[in-house]
Image (tube, rainbow, N blue to C red):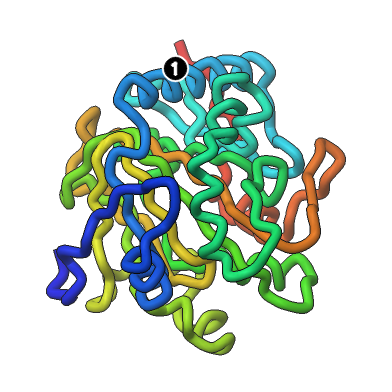
Amino acid sequence: MTSNALANYPRFTLGEQLTTEQIAFFQTHGFLHFSGFISRETVAELVKASQAVERQWLDERREKVNGIPVKYGRDLDGRPIVQRFAFTNQFHERLAAFLKDPRFAVLFPLLGREGGRIGGDEKDGLVLNHYVNSEGSSHSRLGWHTDGLRDLFLGKRQLLPMLNVGVHLNDLGVEHGGLRLIAGTHTQGFFKMAFGKRYFFDHQPDPREIAVIPAAGDLTLHDGRLWHRVQQSSISGEASRRRVFYVPIVAGPYEPKSEASPTPIYHRLASKLGWNPKLPEVTT
């Protein structure tokens, strides 16, 4: 943990509507953490569904989904695995049904405007990040970034409001790494959001950062303008494995992706830098 005053930030319970306290906390700090959003039985169902999607993509040797590269790596036993899935909700009925949970709509008012919706067909859809800290893994950490700047990369004239909603599928301690964020940076100006850190290259801890420590089934969300990163686990092997789903809540014009969609420039750059590894060959 850091010495940040919010190191022991409050965990809330999501009800039929947001409370005044929850709204005020989000407006001030730019994030919320809700305990027990889904049961452990549901966690197991979602993991099983993602494993079915993984088998399909491995069989197909799929390289992209709606223009978004599939990120491959190797598991502890050396077998190929998918480590970043995009639009998983389009490949399994259980994952599609998950996004229809009416409790997601309770979060829409945090956008601050009408017309909020789950972006299951927009941006990268329902993303699954599968982190493993091992020799063959290609996905064990992620450098500092904001989600909001993507719209400008795509030629938008303004930053539209966005919430990045995570549903966590593992019990984590601080030693497991995971989400780190800098509370309050959602109110920073454009210059600090664009140039405050080296996007994705910078992995250094920040004295202001907060470690988000969820239990399996918890939901977290943060404003798309908030600085955040993913800390690498300090332990390796099976104990380092963690899975988390992310889906955007968005407003503004509906902009669905399809198999004809081009690969965004930032993903093309990531591929050139080797950050989106293709399916490794199976060795015998």
Which x, y percent locates residue 13?
30, 48
Which x, y percent locates residue 127?
55, 40
**Would you identify the image quadrant in which residue 176 lies?**
top left
Q: Is disc 1 surrounded by few (<14), some (14 to 19) or many (20+) residues within 10 Å?
A: few
Q: Is residue 64 above or below residue 173?
A: above
- What secondary structure is found at the residue carrying circle 1? helix
Q: Is residue 3 above or below residue 154?
A: below
Quadrant where the N terminus sits is bottom left
Three-letter amino acid code at the position of disc 1? Lys
Residue behind mark 1: 48
Which x, y percent locates residue 124?
64, 46
Q: Nearer the viewer, residue 272 or 221?
A: 221
Quadrant where the C terminus sits is top left
- State the count of labels: 1
Residue under the image location 35 percent in, 66 percent down: 181
Horizontal relation, residue 247 to residue 226: left or right:
right
Residue under the image location 41 percent in, 41 percent down: 167
Residue under the image location 32 percent in, 54 percent down: 33
Horizontal relation, residue 227 to residue 133: left or right:
right
**Would you identify the image quadrant in which residue 58 lies?**
top right
Q: Nearer the viewer, residue 83 or 5?
A: 5
As drawn, the residue found furthest toward the top would be 284
Horizontal relation, residue 65 to residue 177: left or right:
right
Residue under the image location 31 percent in, 70 percent down: 204
Residue 135 visible within the image: no
Q: Nearer the viewer, residue 135 or 62?
A: 62
Which x, y percent locates residue 38?
36, 32
Residue 211 visible within the image: yes
